[in-house]
Image (cartoon, helix red, strand yellow):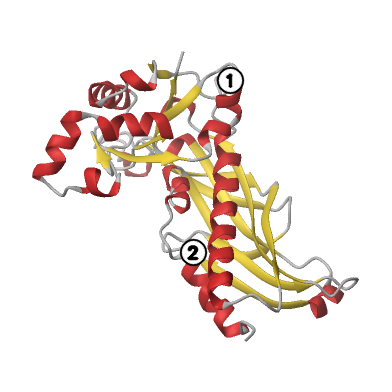
């Protein structure tokens, strides 16, 4: 029996609710995650925080209305990339087939968005190097040194992230000190291969960081630490360009992850062949902001 539109809607939302690590990597930066229809080239304003300053109150000038610096400024970010993942829906597609294809497509779009953002993490954009070395040498002591880098760089204490390529994340999983501590606490590292919080950093591995521009060239990027001020990221939903094509689009659904990340799902038909497809997609843009709030980790 064919999968119904109602079932597809449920499957699509469950896919983006799956808490895949790929959905949360963009939380490392300042974001504007729009659920409105947009076109490539549209601009969204993203709020980016900078550290507030203070001053002495001056009775004679009554300087309450004098700004001391810092706070939130708004950066224009152009939605300049359209990322999609399309799959075929046939008469044989079961509920479980659809669930697997939908989850795969949602993750693929999230990973495409992550890679597009990571392509900006290059030596030209972010000059600070916080660690140099092989994965086999990377451990909690190096992370403690990175904490010092973040402190000196005045990274916001409650907005710090560390994203690593898989070999460097695996080195933390194998760190005997972390494993021994974990046995005495939640057992999460040993049981689920998860290091969530380490020396103030929300810690994640990324499947796509190793394929980013700074990793595949001569810069040897293997990870980075950051706070949200280092980059602004905006996303939106692709608007249907041709109103006459709506007859071929059988359903359009907005998918929203718990963190606000939105994607669009369309079920649509090829008029020439009659073949039916499902597409998950989003628009995304990114811009370098405070380059002092990100330090690169490199292998050499």
Q: Nearer the viewer, mark 1 or mark 2?
A: 2
> Image point 53% across, 42% down: which residue?
232
Disc 1 and disc 2 in contact, CB within 8 angstroms: no
Say few, some or many: other residues with alpha carbon within 10 Å of mark 1 (under 14 / 14 to 19 / 20 or more). few
Q: Residue furthest right?
A: 272
Q: Residue furthest top?
A: 300
The quarter of the rendered structure image containing the N terminus is: bottom right
Question: To which residue does mark 2 refer?
Answer: 16
Instruction: Report whether 267 appears left or right of 114.
Output: right
Say few, some or many: other residues with alpha carbon within 10 Å of mark 2 (under 14 / 14 to 19 / 20 or more). many
Secondary structure type for disc 2? helix
Q: Position of residue 58 (x, y in %)?
A: 26, 34
> Image point 50% across, 18% down: which residue?
127
Secondary structure type for disc 1? loop
> Image point 59% across, 33% down: which residue?
119
Q: Is residue 80 above or below residue 130?
A: below
Q: Position of residue 221 (x, y in %)?
A: 50, 24
141 or 259: nearer the viewer: 141
| Residue 263, picture quadrant | bottom right
Q: Residue furthest front?
A: 92
Question: To which residue does mark 1 refer?
Answer: 124
Q: Position of residue 161 (x, y in %)?
A: 36, 38
On the question of residue 115 being in view, the answer is yes
| Residue 282, picture quadrant | bottom right
Q: Position of residue 11 (x, y in %)?
A: 52, 74
Mark before the other along the chain sequence, 1 or 2 = 2
């Amino acid at each position: 029996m064919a999968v119904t539109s109602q079932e597809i809607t449920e499957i699509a939302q469950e896919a983006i609710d799956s808490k895949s690590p790929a959905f949360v990597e963009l939380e490392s930066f300042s974001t504007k995650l729009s659920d409105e229809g947009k076109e490539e080239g549209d601009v969204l304003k993203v709020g980016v925080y900078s550290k507030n300053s203070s001053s002495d109150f001056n009775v004679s000038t009554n300087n309450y209305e004098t700004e001391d610096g810092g706070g939130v400024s708004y950066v224009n970010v152009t939605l300049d990339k359209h990322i999609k993942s399309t799959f075929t829906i046939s008469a044989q597609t079961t509920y479980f087939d659809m669930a697997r294809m939908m989850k795969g497509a949602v993750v693929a779009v999230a990973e495409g968005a992550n890679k597009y953002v990571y392509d900006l993490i290059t030596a030209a954009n972010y000059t600070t190097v916080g660690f140099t070395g092989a994965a086999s040498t990377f451990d909690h002591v190096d992370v403690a040194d990175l904490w010092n880098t973040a402190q000196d760089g005045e990274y916001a204490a409650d907005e710090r992230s560390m994203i690593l390529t898989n070999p460097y994340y695996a080195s933390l999983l194998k760190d005997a000190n972390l494993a021994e501590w974990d046995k005495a606490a939640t057992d999460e590292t040993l049981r689920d291969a998860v290091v969530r919080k380490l020396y103030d950093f929300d810690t994640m591995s990324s499947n796509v960081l190793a394929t980013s521009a700074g990793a595949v060239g001569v810069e040897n990027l293997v990870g980075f630490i950051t706070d949200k001020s280092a980059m602004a990221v905006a996303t939106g939903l692709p608007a249907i360009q041709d109103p006459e094509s709506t007859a071929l689009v059988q359903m359009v659904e907005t998918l929203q992850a718990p963190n606000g990340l939105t994607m669009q799902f369309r079920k649509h038909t090829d008029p020439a062949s009659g073949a039916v497809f499902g597409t998950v997609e989003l628009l995304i843009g990114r811009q370098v902001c405070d380059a002092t709030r990100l330090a690169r980790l490199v292998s050499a």
